Amino acid sequence: MGSMRKGIGYISGFLRQPEPNVLLFGFLLNLPWELLQVPFFAGMSSIAHWDGVIQCVTAAAGDAVILLVAFWATACLWRERMWITQPSLNATIAFVATGIAVTIALEWWATGDSGRWTYAKTMPTIPGLGTGVLPLLQWLLIPPLVVWLVRRQIR
C-alpha cells in the first residue's frame, strides 16, 4: 500500500508542475482550433478523413510544443519557472509574443520554400507578412487561456 501512495504522490507532484500542464492544456485547446481551420488550408477539405485528423493532431501537438518553448522563454526572461502561478501582464505578453514570433516564422517557412502547407483562398492574410490571420488569432487567444488554466491547476 505504501508504494501505491508513493506512486500517486509522484503523479500528483508531476501534475503540479507547469510543463505537463502547459502541454496538456495547449494540446486540448489547439486541437479544436486546428480542426476548425481545415477549410482555410488548401486541399485539407478533400483529403481522406483520417489523414486530416492526423494532420490536425500533429499540428495541435506542435502548437503545444511551441507553447512549452514560449513558457520556457518567459521563465528565462523572468528567471522564475513558476511565473505562471502568479502571471504578471508583462509575463503573459512575453509568453504570447514568443508564440506569435515562432508562429510567424513557422508559417513563413511552411507556406514558402518548404511548401509544407498552402492557405486556401478563404484564409485572410496579413499584408506584407503573408501570415494567415487565423494562426495569429490562435496565438492571441489560446496562450492566455493556457496561462489561466495552468494557474488554476497548479495553485
Image: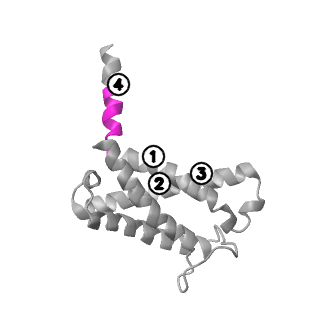
Q: Can residue 107 be seen in this view?
A: yes
In the rendered structure, which amino acid carries the disc numbered 4? Gly
| Residue highlighted by disc 1 | 24
Crowdedness near tag 2: few (<14), some (14–19) or many (≥20) residues, C-alpha within 10 Å: many
Residue 23, x across and y down, in percent: 43, 49
Q: What element carries label 4?
A: helix
In primary-sequence order, the first of circles 2 and 3 is 3
Position of residue 132 relative to residue 150, above or below, is below
**What's the residue at 26%, 61% (across, down)?**
76
Instruction: Please name the amino acid that badge 3 sits on.
Output: Val
Q: Read off the residue under disc 2.
A: 64
Q: Residue furthest bottom?
A: 128
Q: What stretch is highlighted in magenta?
A: 9-17
Left/right placement of residue 102 relative to residue 135 reads left
Magenta highlight: main SS: helix
Give the residue drawn at x 34%, y 37%.
Answer: 14
Residues at discs 4 and 1 in contact (Cβ within 8 Å): no
Q: Name the residue under label 3.
A: 57
- The answer to whether residue 49 is left or right of residue 138 is right
Q: Which of marks 4 and 1 is in front?
A: 1
**What is the three-letter code of the residue carrying label 1?**
Leu
Circle 2: residue type: Ala
N-terminal-most mark, 1 or 3: 1
- Write down the residue under mark 4: 7
Tag on residue 46? none
Label 4–label 2 contact, CB within 8 A: no
Q: Residues within 10 Å of mark 4 (few under 14, many from 20)?
A: few
Instruction: Choose the circle earlier in sequence order: 4 or 1.
Output: 4
Tell me how far mark 1 sits from mark 3, CA to CA: 13 Å
Crowdedness near tag 3: few (<14), some (14–19) or many (≥20) residues, C-alpha within 10 Å? some
